[in-house]
Amino acid sequence: MRNRYSLAFTDVDSDSILISPIVPFSYRELSDNILHVATKGEMLWDLAEKYYSKKGDSSLGLNDAWSYYDIIADFQPNPIADPTLSMIGGENIYLPSIQTIKMLIENENRRQDFVTY
């Protein structure tokens, strides 16, 4: 299963695990961004599942699509501090495209942006 620390550097010893901070992929205007107007009660993981899940045998979707909710939270012009809260409705929610996730956000080359110890 995907988690937001998959690209972080880790240092494991017998007593602890040290995980480097990650750099959120913040909002930027891209031609393939998706705009969604939230309805009352929607959750970010619902949007991630709706826009990123594999439909049938499609190779265009993402495995565990719901788990990309944190990317949506970070990608807002004003990042969402608590992505586990439901939306009140009427908010513009910007989603990066699947291509942006694959090519820019979860690209192994982004590791160089992370602070290491």
Image (cartoon, rainbow, N blue to C red):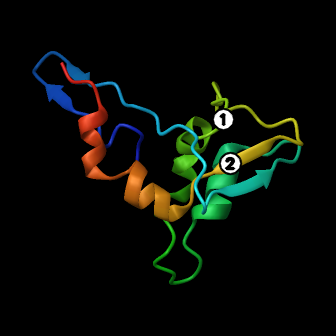
Label 2 Cα neighbours within 10 Å, binned few <14 / some 14-19 / many ≥20 = many
* Quadrant of image for the C terminus: top left
Amino acid on which disc 1 is placed: Pro
Return the x and y of residue 62 as percentages of the image width and height: 48, 64
Return the x and y of residue 30 as percentages of the image width and height: 58, 55
> Is 6 displayed left or right of 52 in the figure?
left
- Asked whether residue 50 appears in the rendered view, the answer is yes
Residue 61 against residue 89 in the figure, above or below = below
**Residue lying farthest to the bottom in this orientation:** 57
Residue drawn at x 61%, y 49% as measured from the top left: 29
Residue 11 against residue 47 in the figure, above or below = above
- Asked whether residue 1 appears in the rendered view, the answer is no
Res. 115 image quadrant: top left
The residue labelled by disc 2 is: 94
Q: Secondary structure at mark 2?
A: strand
Q: Secondary structure at mark 1?
A: loop
Residue drawn at x 26%, y 40% as measured from the top left: 111
Return the x and y of residue 107 as percentages of the image width and height: 32, 53
Q: Mark 2 touching mark 1, by CB under 8 A? A: yes
Residue drawn at x 53%, y 49% as measured from the top left: 68
Mark 2–mark 1 Cα distance, whole angstroms, equals 8 Å
Residue drawn at x 47%, y 39% as measured from the top left: 25
Between 100 and 89, the one lying in front of the other is 100
The residue labelled by disc 1 is: 77
Between 84 and 34, the one lying in front of the other is 34
Return the x and y of residue 6 as percentages of the image width and height: 32, 43
> Is 39 displayed left or right of 33 in the figure?
right
> Is 57 displayed left or right of 113 in the figure?
right
Lower position in the chain sequence, tag 2 or tag 1: 1
Label 1 Cα neighbours within 10 Å, binned few <14 / some 14-19 / many ≥20 = some
Between 100 and 2, the one lying in front of the other is 100
Amino acid on which disc 2 is placed: Tyr
